[in-house]
Structure formats: C-alpha cells, structure tokens
Amino acid sequence: MFTKRLNQLLLYATRRILKDTSGYKGALKAFLEAHNIGAGDIVVVKTDKDEYKGTVIPRYEYASQDFLTLKLPNGYNIGVEFNKIRSIKLVEEHAPPAFAPQHLTAPKKGLPKAVIISTGGTIASRVDYRTGGVRPALSASDLLSVVPELGDIAQVDADLLFSIYSENMTFSHWSKLSERIYNYIKEGYNGVVVTHGTDTMGYAAAALSFALHKTPIPILLVGSQRSSDRPSSDAASNLIAAMVTSLKAPFSGVYVSMHEWVSDERISIHVGTKVRKLHTSRRDAFKSINTSPVAVYKDGELNVLRNDLPKRGVSDDFRIFPKFEEKVSLIKFYPGFDPSIIESLYQKGYKGLVLEGTGLGHVNKLTADSLKKLIRDGFIVCMTSQCIYGRVRLTVYDTGRDLLDAGVLPLEDMLPETAFVKLSWCLGNFEREEVSKMMRSNIANEYNSRLLLEEVE
C-alpha cells in the first residue's frame, strides 16, 4: 500500500515537473504549478464577476506577470488579471502548442511544376515564447504542409536554400539564390516562388531583377508580417497569391507579393525594383513607389493592371549575371555630415557609393568638395533622394549643378536601395568604363520615365 502511494506521488510529481509554464514567473507560475496546470491545458477560471473557459497559452518571458493568457473557444486570446482570479480548474490536459507538419499528399497529375525556395524570415518562422520573438524554424516543405491549397495549383517542390533572418542576407546569398532560380527555370519549372524575410526583401528583389536577365516566367518573392503559426498570419494568402502569379501572369521578371490592405481580401504584386517596406509591422507594409502595382490577386483571380511589362514566354536571351561587388556603400546625408566618412570608405578600397541626398539630391558644400576629389580618383558616386516620392534633379540649384560638373550620377526616381544593389551588380559584372552608362540605363524597370502630374512645374 505504501509503495503504491509512493509511486502515485512520484508520478504526480513527474507530471508536475513536465508541465510547461513557459513565460510565467513568480506567484503566477507557482499558482499554475500548484494546480498542475501548464500551457496547452484547458481550464475554467473564475473571477469575482466572470467565468472563462479556455486554453492556457505560453507567454514570452518579458511580458507582464499580472495576467494569465487564455485562448477562448472562439479563437480570441484574453488576459485574465491574476489578482482577480478566485479559482482555476483543470478541465482537460493537453500538450503545449507545438508545430506538427501535415502529411504531404501526392502531387496531382497534369498540374504545372513549381518550386518554393525558402531563405527564412518571418514567413518561415515560429514564435519563441521565451522572448516573444520569432525564430527561423520552418522549412519550405513545412510551408507546403500548412498551405494545402498549393497542391491544387501546381505540383510543388520545396527547396530549403537558407534559413536565416533577412538582415543576415549578403551579396553572396543573392548570387547563390539567383543561380538556384536560373537552374530551376532551365530545368523547365513553370513557377518559382522565393520566401524571404520582409526587412530586406526589397534589396533581394532588386538583386534578382538585375542578376536574371530576360526571365521567361515571373519570379515572385513573398514574405509575411506575422509568423505562420499565428492566427493573424498573412503567410498563406501571400504565398497562394505569389504561386498563382508565378504560374499564370502574362508578364515576366521579378516581383514581390504582399498584402494590399490589412485584411486578406487583396494581395498586390509589385515590381521588384520599385517596392519598399513602409511600415514595421502592418500587413500592408509594402508599397510601389513612383509607380503602381502590376496586378492584384483577389478571390482566387489575378487582375493584371499594367500592359507595359516584358511578356511571359520562351526567352532566347535568358542569362544570368550573378556577381556582386561587396565594396559599395549606401549613405544618407544629414545636416552636419562629415565627408571624412566617405573618404574613409575610399581609403578602405570601396569602389562606389550611393548617396541619399536631401530633396532633389543635395549635400553640403564640404561634402560636395570632397566628392569632386574622390571622383577624379575613380570613385563612383550616385545620387538618389531620401524623399519617398519624386525624383532627383541636379539642374535646379547651384549645389546640384556643381555635383553634376563633378561627375555625380543622378539616378532620377530610382530607390536608394535599388541603386545600391544595382551599383554592386554593375561593378561585379562589367568593366569600370561601362558602369556609368549601365547605371543610367533602365534595365529592370528601376526607372519610371513617365512624368507624373505632381512633377509638372
């Protein structure tokens, strides 16, 4: 009898130890452990005024310890103030939340072939409840398993190329990614989708736009502002829109697929060299700058908005230029700017620079004088504007005309990020004397040549 009771106590103690109370501390953690309750368990919580039934949700470790987080049956999360809890009852024991990839069904015959190349980012991440952040954890095949609708669109292969945050992407990653895409298209794939972190997705889209010359199909980069395991995730809808666009759009080139608005109703397709992330966290963070989206995906249909794009189809001149020069920089001018910053780059062997000037493309006299000397020594300096909209015009003021005389290259309405990538690409693939001409040429729709109404003086 004593042995049986001891075994029961040991089993109970073991169960208590195994309970997951991730993110809870102090008195609240002790309260949960005293009632043998952990993340995933269904409980009934009573306060002085209300009663709640829901699932205990883990919290990140820096969250307030004044609340117990419950997921209600309707899917909403609530915080129950700890000092108002009068009782808690365990209703059902469940394992804590964990990602379990779904079984992949056999691809349907007769559908076009497509590939999802995963590089990481929020779209391929999971919530880390220790910190409340996300970490790269999902593979491309995991994404396929949680978005089964893709199986009705194409025979989809998955390729986990990288699993990194987008801020860790480098020039060499762009080279490897462009080579991988080139090979898939040469092998006959009808659609290519790249999952990417949103923070530097605009840079990567520009890099692929220049590296892949005259692609026969549209290549879609897609990200998510919410990780795939969150109820508010935009990953699935963005991914489906990207896949449909890559397979069915009548145009070719490199594009970005992201939410047009905070709801799931519409997904915008943006030119890869003309898109910028304008918000840190909203679903509709990405906008086309100085141009319009090329298409909108809604209710399962792709509505093409522009007819001035390169056409989809067999390309006799599909080539790859995958090299990027690392010794280039992107610098924002600001009041009191010290030109020795730029001079130090030149001394370290940097070959070129993209400046974000004020307004129409201006810098102070000290910086202008310094640039003249560097340009005479072979340093390439390109001018963009730190304004979101409009274009560089160095002919309006004396400051700009002096910069033109010194050899600064004005880049019209090219985005600074795109200009930085393009300069790196030009220096990596062409001779020095060709770079100036290439930077002023419209290669991948990076320039908008139309004169907009607001630009008419």
Image (tube, grey):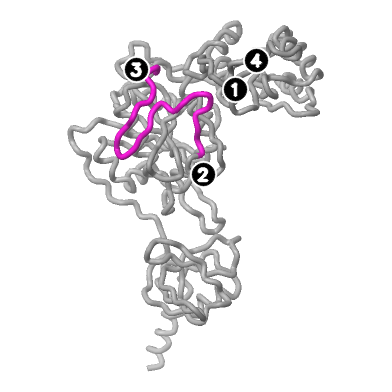
Which residue is labeled 4 in the image? 393
Earlier residue among tags 2 and 3: 2
Residue type at mark 3 is: Lys
Q: The residue tagged with tag 4: helix, strand or loop?
A: loop
Q: The residue tagged with tag 1: helix, strand or loop?
A: loop
Magenta-highlighted residues:
285-309
Res 282 label: 2
Q: The residue tagged with tag 2: helix, strand or loop?
A: loop
Query: What is the distance, in whole Å, between disc 4 and disc 2 at their CAs?
Result: 33 Å
- Label 1 crowd bin: few (<14), some (14–19), many (20+), radius 10 Å: some
Residue at 80% x, 18% y is 365
Q: Is residue 175 visible?
A: no
Query: What is the distance, in whole Å, between disc 1 and disc 3 at their CAs?
Result: 28 Å
Q: Is residue 305 magenta?
A: yes
Res 390 label: 1
Camera-nearest residue between 404 and 216: 404
Q: Nearer the viewer, mark 1 or mark 3?
A: 1
The spot of residue 417 in percent (x, y) is 58, 26
Asked which quadrant contains residue 436, the reply is top right
Camera-nearest residue between 72 and 97: 72
Query: What is the distance, in whole Å, between disc 4 and disc 3 at their CAs?
Result: 32 Å
Res 311 label: 3
Earlier residue among tags 1 and 2: 2
The spot of residue 298 in percent (x, y) is 34, 37
- Label 4 crowd bin: few (<14), some (14–19), many (20+), radius 10 Å: many
The spot of residue 227 in percent (x, y) is 46, 48
Earlier residue among tags 1 and 3: 3
- Residues at badges 4 and 2 in contact (C-beta under 8 Å)? no
Camera-nearest residue between 255 and 160: 255
Residue at 51% x, 44% y is 282
In the rendered structure, the answer to whether residue 24 lies left or right of residue 226 reads right
Q: Relative to residue 309, is residue 124 depicted above or below?
A: below
